[in-house]
Image (tube, rainbow, N blue to C red):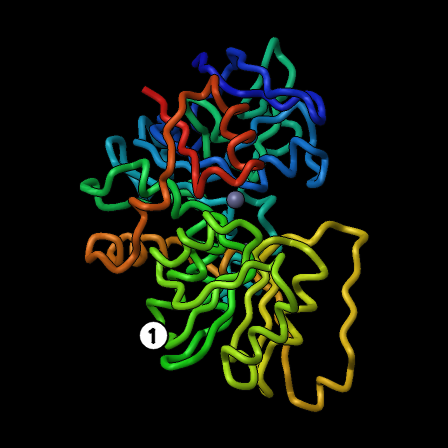
């Protein structure tokens, strides 16, 4: 079928809106009509060349939609189902998958079409790659069945979409990766879509103190609405010193949700003994971080985090249940809606710090 999509052809150039060809579903594939797709920082980093990906490709990795058709061996969804797609596609058979860590799957290639097969997406006969195995800045997506999960159809799809990336990453970082304990103190560096999700995860986990750190007062005021109990503007004075004072000696958990080495170092130094710093933001390749090793005698820990250590087929419906119960605020995270053609405006608004999320809507 022919669909409209935003194609990434050149670094630092606007995405080009084109008609592309989508193949028919193979035995394990699902054809999904895209209804909504959040615009994430990783899409923008990719446009700037910060994340290497083959071109031409279609970006977008935070979608929700409705199943149009399924292949003969698809068991988890059926036409008409409302679904979220997640980049943490998993093979289900490798050691990581079998040990319950599908987000660390080492054989995702098993869920892709072979090089020798016809591509899922093409333009004038040439392959268009699927960024994050999704390619969601498009009117429809052709996905492996283990990249989608069925959701409650009463949840608005523009809200559900956020669970595809930002919410799964941030809430999962708190609940799955760090396993924040009730009564603990938590610091979150960065109050964008992921940072706000970490704040909400910490609140759901029962943290007693949640300190948001950002450079923009508007984002800090926003962070309070999602559960931050204290805020610090990083441009005003010594952030680590302020946190030490606020927490009376250091935080139990500190999340870096921006992707800057300096902030990860601050996250480490603001910890209490035995505290945990969690690397949620994507620090650019080639950059390095340094820690004073004496602090390791306080048994401080630094841990990595990929997509909130998700098992999204289990987690996504749980997070949406939190939403339905009023415990996870997705409504407040959706700042704007735009049509696909205005994806460039969505990038601009994100860079300007004007939005928690712009959601692209497809009719
Ligand atoms: Zn993302
Ligand atoms: Zn696997």
Give the structural element (helix, strand or loop) at label 1.
loop
Tell me: residue 111, above or below residue 229.
above
Front-most of 108 and 277? 277
Front-most of 108 and 131? 131
Q: Give the position of the C terminus as an image quadrant.
A: top left
Tell me: residue 333, above or below residue 195.
above
Determine if residue 200 is in view. Answer: yes
- Name the outermost residue toward the front: 236
Q: Is 178 left or right of 205, judged from the image as shown?
A: right
Q: Is 65 left or right of 153, judged from the image as shown?
A: right
Q: Give the position of the N terminus as an image quadrant.
A: top left
Q: Position of residue 24 (x, y in %)?
A: 44, 22
Q: Position of residue 159 (x, y in %)?
A: 31, 41
The residue to which callout 1 is attached is 206
Q: Residues within 10 Å of mark 1 (few under 14, many from 20)?
A: some
Query: Which residue is rendered at x = 45% and y = 39% of the image?
Result: 355
Q: Position of residue 238 (x, y in %)?
A: 65, 68
**Quadrant in the rendering for residue 295:** bottom right
Q: Position of residue 278 (x, y in %)?
A: 58, 68
Query: Which residue is rendered at x = 46% and y = 55% of the image?
Result: 220
């Amino acid at each position: 079928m022919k669909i409209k999509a935003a194609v990434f052809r050149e670094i630092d150039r606007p995405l080009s809106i084109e008609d592309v060809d989508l193949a028919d579903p193979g035995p394990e594939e699902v054809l999904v009509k895209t209804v909504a797709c959040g615009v994430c920082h990783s899409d923008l980093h990719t446009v700037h060349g910060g994340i290497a990906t083959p071109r031409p490709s279609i970006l977008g990795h935070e979608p929700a939609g409705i199943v149009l058709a399924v292949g003969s061996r698809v068991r988890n969804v059926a036409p008409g189902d409302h679904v979220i797609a997640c980049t943490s596609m998993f093979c289900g058979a490798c050691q990581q998958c079998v040990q319950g860590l599908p987000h660390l799957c080492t054989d995702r290639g098993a869920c892709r079409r072979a090089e020798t097969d016809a591509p899922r997406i093409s333009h004038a006969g040439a392959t268009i790659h699927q960024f994050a195995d999704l390619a969601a800045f498009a009117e429809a997506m052709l996905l492996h069945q283990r990249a989608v999960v069925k959701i409650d159809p009463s949840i608005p799809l523009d809200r559900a979409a956020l669970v595809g990336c930002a919410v799964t990453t941030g809430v999962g970082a708190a609940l799955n990766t760090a396993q924040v304990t009730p009564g603990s103190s938590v610091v979150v560096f960065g109050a964008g879509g992921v940072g706000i999700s970490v704040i909400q995860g910490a609140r759901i986990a029962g943290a007693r103190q949640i300190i948001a750190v950002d450079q923009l007062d508007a984002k800090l005021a926003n962070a309070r609405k999602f559960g931050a109990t204290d805020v610090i503007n990083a441009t005003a004075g010594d952030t680590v010193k302020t946190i030490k004072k606020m927490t009376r000696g250091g935080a139990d958990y500190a999340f870096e949700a921006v992707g800057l080495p300096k902030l990860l170092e601050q996250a480490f130094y603001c910890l209490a003994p035995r505290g945990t710093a969690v690397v949620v933001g994507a620090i650019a390749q080639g950059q390095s971080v340094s820690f004073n090793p004496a602090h390791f005698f306080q048994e401080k820990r630094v841990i990595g985090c990929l997509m909130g250590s998700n098992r999204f087929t289990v987690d996504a419906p749980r997070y949406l249940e939190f939403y339905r119960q009023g415990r996870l605020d997705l409504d407040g995270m959706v700042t704007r809606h735009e049509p696909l053609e205005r994806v460039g405006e969505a990038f601009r608004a994100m860079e300007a710090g004007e939005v928690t999320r712009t959601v692209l809507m497809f009719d």
